[in-house]
Image (cartoon, coloured by chain):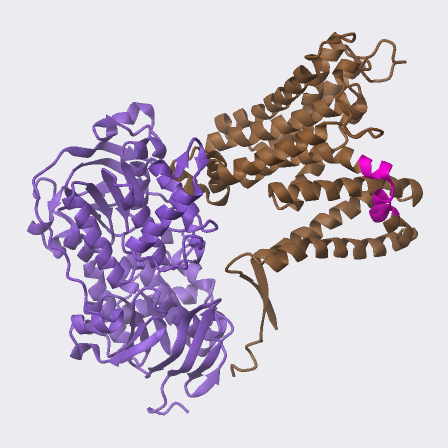
Chain colours: A brown, B purple
Amino acid sequence: MKISFIRRDRASRWAMILAPILAFVGAIATSIILFTALGKDPALALYSLVLEPFLSWYNFSEILLKMAPLLLIAQGLAIGFRANVFNIGAEGQLVMGAIAASALPVWYPLGDSALMLPAMLLMGALGGMAWAAIAALFRTRFNANEILVTLMLTLIAVQILNYLLLGPWKDPKGFNFPQSVRFPDAALLPTLLPGTRVNISLLFAFVVSALCYVFMRHRFSGYQLLVGGLAPRAASYAGFSQSRAVWISLCIGGLCAGLAGAAEVSGPLGQLQRSVTLGYGYSAIIVAYLGGLNPLGIVLSAFVMSAIYIGGDNAMVSADLPIAAVWVFQGLLLTFYLAGLTFIRHRLIFLPSTRKAAP
Amino acid sequence: MTSAKTPLLALTGVSKRYGGVTANAGIDLIVDPGSIHAILGENGAGKSTLMKLIYGVQSPDEGQILWKGQPVRLGSPADARRLGIGMVFQHFSLFETLSVVQNISLIVPGSQKTLGARIRALGDEFGLTVDPDAMVHALSVGERQRVEIIRCLLLNPDLLILDEPTSVLPPQSVKKLFETLRALQAKGMAILFISHKLEEIKDLCDTATILRAGRVTGRVTPAEHSAKDLATLMIGRAMPPPMPAVARSGGELRLQISGLSHDNDDPFGLPLKDLSLTLRSGEILGIAGISGNGQQDLAALISGEIVQARSARDTLRLMGQPMADQGAAARRALGFAFVPEERLGRGAVPDMSLSDNALLTAHGAGLVTGGFISRAAERAFTADIIDRFDVRTPGPQAEAGALSGGNLQKFILGREITLAPKVLLVSQPTWGVDIGAATDIRRRLIEMRNDGAAILVISEELEELFQICDRLHVLHKGRLSPSLITAQVTAEEVGAYMIGAGPTKGAAA
């Protein structure tokens, strides 16, 4: 018996629906084994990982809070990924966005201008974009691989953050903690859902999602990026500029990540802290692929991913799971999903062995 | 069991479907030992599928394959080789960085030393001379084909399948190949010869099985029929007559290449040296030559996929403007269009619909307004191409990758022609396209020329170039021959240029 994959004539709708579901079931089944091996109660662990986030309004609102940056960054990254431009350093762009946005309240800690917040968001977006643009420049001028450059720029961004928080931007009244002054009210994002920490950055994320959808589905420049990703030689044949694709992809990705960074410091954090780098920039890569790089799919996957985050936090507290186990669960989910994706485009066939018949 | 009456290979009622498309329906085929058997058919008639079934690349859905009277199931080419079936594909599978004997030892067991001796012996016996220690990248296309054939012969097959073997050869080498095949036949080997060149089949083959739309439409002795009869059996109607080429006086200068040189980055690539040509409106200029002599780079240099340095910008002028340092988009903006030889992945994006593939180069034809793609305009444009160029497909939403090579070629050619270009570059216009469609494509090119377009055709098929071109250049080892007026040269003279044996410069017009 020989098993092989045959490409389908067209993507199977059934597989498209089933792949995420099966990935989820597969990840859970594997985690049960894993948690049992760790000596934890799998039922309790899964309850806190999967169900608890939805059982209280507070937990649910925390999901929405985490969803905003994930959604924002993932939408921006997905555009680049579809154009085969792999921006792996959204984390660094987020940090630079957060730093650029923080400059205003750090310099004007008593500022109360209504323009403060919009200016911060703009600076954050531009800061993230500028950081990503370095990688675009290196790629188009020196043909330096953007995966490596964006990744290494992230390390630099984190060190800049450390320098600022331990040096010039450290809050003089902050008991020597590495954090900036607390931002004035004029520098804080308005709350979206009263009684929760959910702020209007969630709306930004939805607006960006809609814009990304329009860009990729209806704009000619989005189409050019798609062609560059699907068939680079066809793009070159048609005269679509590869360096333009690199610039657009990295700039959009950096812009979204920078905006997310600005929204973090002016939202739940309320100041510039080291904890602005929680790994959203990396998780967003998973979110983007989990959503099939499709703007609508990403909305769903951002929600699922942040639910898993909140579940992970819960599980660490109530089921005493180590954080590594939470990461393994997230990794399992992605692995199963990517395996499932194969079946959308391919089907398995079983070939009978040939030796029997051929003498 | 191998009496004289048992056929070597017999297929009964073999069918193969891909999704909803029936590629082969109830095919019966009988190949006798020691015969040269032609498989004739239009592109998309199911020839390739049938060969894949015989060579074990795929399994039939229905029907039976009998080998020497025994039913067999072929699960892989290895199974087929074990039984004694060898195949030479149209596109060779040789590693350029290895020597001939190293390439062969990848498949054929034995030490390189004994293999080398066997290669020489076979070469002497069947006129397949090739140096076993030569590196493959240094070999001509004809020599590479010999290596492929030798590789099959070393496994002592009873049946040798050749897929369009003459399409890559100059006229002189075709004769040599036929002598080899006849010598093999004399040794008792059967040969399945796939071709669309009717004269060759009449010349070489004992029997022919003709396929049309996945079914057998005839079994004939080719020598007893005229090429016209064979063509009628093959395409189901009489051949459309070729349009006579009307000689025209020179129009305005549209494309001028002067002193164009290019070094290929590929270590085995061929540099183009000091090329010059002119192309005027109302003429078709052909570039003849065996593939691998620099055609791909020449096409990319003209299309703008390879951009020259600014200092060399005058080496290529389009509509009088220096364009050698400009990209493909700028050249298209001046009225240039291009049909590349690779359809999937270059001329079209396989994973996109035909509609979206129309957008690839026709975005300037009202399909994009204010940066937004107009889906309705896109669909109408595509439906129009499908209709006018007889592209066989379910509709504009079909993925380009699902079309057969010939149909996709019709689509791409249709798209580029619909743009009404001032200069059209077509590379291998009828590769893998059936005769009916090929004739139609040639007729359209001539029509465009008569309407004042300037057309440059790069083709390996000399017959085709003679049919449609007003003038010819031959590309050999990165150099262009002088311009030859088609009406005044013979195929043999052009063939001499193709193998680098042309008269010295100045001897020709």
Q: Position of residue A23 (x, y in %)?
A: 71, 54
- The rendered magenta stretch, by its main secondary structure, is classed as helix
Please report the residue visible at 23 percent of the width from the left and 41 percent of the height from the top.
B479
Whether residue B88 is visible, yes or no, is yes
Residue extending farthest to the front is: A194
Q: Which residues are magenta?
A: A48-62
Displayed quadrant of residue B191:
bottom left
Picture residue at 50% right of the left edge, 36% below the top: A222
Q: Residue at x 21, y 49 (%)?
A: B445
Residue A201 at what x, y percent from top left?
Answer: 71, 28
Residue at image position (46%, 49%) is: B352
Q: Position of residue A350 (x, y in %)?
A: 59, 71
In-image side of A176 versus A228 (left or right): right
Q: In the figure, A308 relative to B150: above or below? A: above
Q: Is residue B147 magenta?
A: no
Q: Is residue A22 above or below residue A100?
A: below
Looking at the picture, how far across and down is residue B347, in whole percent?
37, 47
Q: Is residue A61 magenta?
A: yes
Name the image quarter holding residue A90.
top right
Residue toward you, A4 or B183: A4
Quadrant for the N terminus of chain A, please: bottom right
Q: Is residue B438 above or below residue B199?
A: above
Res. B135 visible in picture: no
